[in-house]
Image (tube, rainbow, N blue to C red):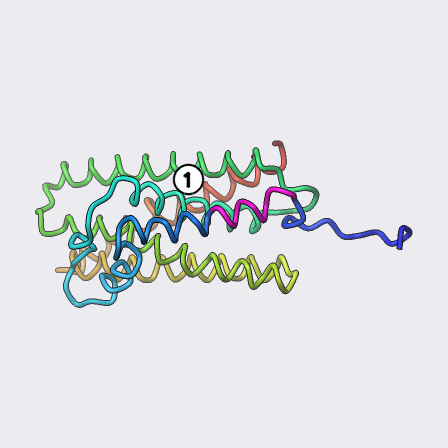
Amino acid sequence: MNAIEHILTPWSASWWGWTMFLLLLCGIASEFMQPGVISQAHRSLLSHNDRTYKDAPRNLYGQLLVTLFRTGTIAMGINLCVYSGGELSFTAYAAVIGAIFGTMLLKRICNGLLGYTFMLSQRSAPVYEQYGDLTTICACLLYPAILVAVHLGSIHAVRWICAAVAVLFLVVWTYRVGRTYACSPAALLYIALYIGTLEILPMGGLLYLSSIMITTL
């Protein structure tokens, strides 16, 4: 047995299992502290009205925990997606989480500038609030999918899963934004420009930055 060379996988890192377990605890605790934060997120995107989970009790700790759950899960998916060999570093994982928070902050500032520049009405505000709903749903789908792919021992399965979740996010978000703003052919062009510059481009930049951090840290 000592002569056999064992393959080093990203989930063989000692911190990987504990991190996934803590992320699961964050998701469960957020639902206990703020009942409906996850279940109503699903209903808000499936409903015909532009509603969010505002009727769920507001709780600062619940919001923080669900943010940690979805950010940590998405960061784990990105780490496994761009993994190219060797030991997966917790420092790189933490750096990807920081990059996600930085990207979300930048996008929030850009959305605020767009709303101020084009004087978007208050009726479109729930659409931006549903961005959190959609990322929560993506994290809920990504978390068990990562566990299944790890059980299968296939890094390629992880990459296909992450790509499918990203495509699902773009399709649903394009539909939600288009349903609110698509009032003319010109508006469709603006929506396509918005999705390309504030969604697809940041995704590509985040993957590129993550690949650099994982290989250097």
Residue ID at (26%, 55%): 35
Who is closer to the viewer here, 175 or 50? 50
**Which picture quadrant has residue 186?**
bottom left
Q: Element type at marker 1?
A: helix
**Residue assigned mark 1:** 100
Name which residue type carries label 1: Ile
Magenta extent: 14-22
Residue ID at (15%, 48%): 125
18 in magenta? yes
Q: Position of residue 138 (x, y in %)?
A: 39, 57
Q: Classify the position of the C terminus by image quarter.
A: top right
Please, which residue is most extreme toward the right here? 3
Main secondary structure type of the part rendered in magenta:
helix
**Which picture quadrant has residue 174?**
bottom left
Residue ID at (50%, 34%): 95
| Left or right: 65 in relation to 86 | left
Who is closer to the viewer here, 93 or 189? 93
How would you rate the neighbour count of disc 1 (Cα within 10 Å): few for under 14, some for 14-19, many for 20 or more? many
Q: Position of residue 84 (x, y in %)?
A: 65, 47
Q: Position of residue 117 (x, y in %)?
A: 14, 37
Who is closer to the viewer here, 67 or 119? 67
Q: Position of residue 56 (x, y in %)?
A: 20, 53
| Left or right: 57 in relation to 97 | left
66 in magenta? no
